[in-house]
Amino acid sequence: MINKTLEELRAQENSYLPGVDVSYHLQKVTLAAVIGPVAVGKTTCLNYISTNSSEIGRVQSFTTRPARPDDPLGDYRYLKHSAENIAVIASKANAGELVQYAVHPTTGYVYGSEASDYYRPYMMLTALANSISGLRRLPFKGIVELCLVSEPNEWLRRISSRSSTEDRLKRLKEGIASLEWCLDQGSAMSWLCSSAGIDKLPAVCNDMQLIIKGELEPNSNNREIGIKLLSKIRKQTAV
């Protein structure tokens, strides 16, 4: 039964659009898609901003996959991967009550979000490059895309403290794809660097907030750092 429901969800995944009520809600929200490799500080920045701003929040999506020890705090609400929960998700999808959803192609775990996850005028979401086209299809008031990077040596120090696993290699490859995509976006992409240290975090997050709210123009000041970081990550995947 659960497999049949998952197949039905997959069949409409790429064409799914939210219903009238959800669309009306999203039209009041500007979404900030924060893109960047693992270990550049995306979670730290998003948590800092959402804690210290009354206008900018952080999207917490749902997933039916089990929690992992290294999952960033606050990224997901975890649901049991059960026939009952999958049926509820499918019912909401059929009624247009979800903002978006995706079924993992191999595990069958479902990821998605609901209107209540977008509770402030500006909402931030960590995003992979391959998810941007789907986000652009949604009826948000606007979408702001930012690339967060760090100095290559600082990034290497951060990533080296994490265990070397198959999942880590997958995330590195996702990081390569995200940086390549950001580099292809030209002047529309804002580049921010998180390597200044924890004492400089407020300044980095302040710039991010200003860009999200349209009070600071997109800039490519840190694009060269992104190019160097891409080279460093490529070397790590070749090891």
Image (tube, grey):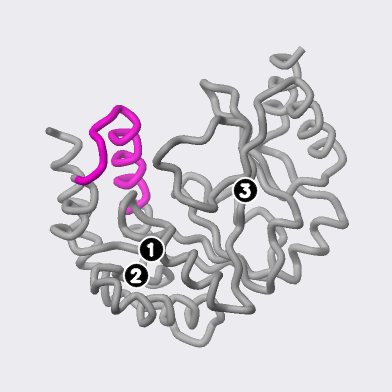
Is 168 in the magenta?
A: yes
Residue at image position (33%, 51%) is 37
Residue 30, x across and y down, in percent: 64, 70
Residue at image position (21%, 65%) is 225
The kind of residue tagged 2 is: Trp
For numbered disc 3, what is the local secondary structure?
strand
Task: Identify the mark nearer the N-term, 1 or 3.
Answer: 3
Residue 91, x across and y down, in percent: 84, 33
Which is more foreground, mark 1 or mark 3?
3
Instruction: Look at the magenta stretch and give its main secondary structure.
Output: helix
Which quadrant, please, contains the N terminus?
A: top right
Residue 136, x across and y down, in percent: 60, 56
- State how far apart marks 3 and 2 are (Cα): 25 Å
Labelled pair 1, 2 in contact (Cβ < 8 Å):
yes
User: Relative to 105, does residue 199 appear above or below in the rendering?
Assistant: below
- CA neighbours of label 1 inside 10 A, class few (<14), some (14 to 19), many (20+): many
Q: Which residue is mark 2?
A: 191
Residue 224, x across and y down, in percent: 20, 67
Residue 61, label in figure: 3
- State how far apart marks 1 and 2 are (Cα): 5 Å
- Compared across the picture, whether 170 is left or right of 30 comes to left
Residue 147, label in figure: 1
Q: In which quadrant of the rendered view does residue 58 lie?
A: bottom right
Task: Identify the mark nearer the N-term, 1 or 2.
Answer: 1
- State how far apart marks 1 and 3 are (Cα): 20 Å
- CA neighbours of label 2 inside 10 A, class few (<14), some (14 to 19), many (20+): many
For numbered disc 2, what is the local secondary structure?
strand
The kind of residue tagged 3 is: Ser
The magenta stretch is 161-180
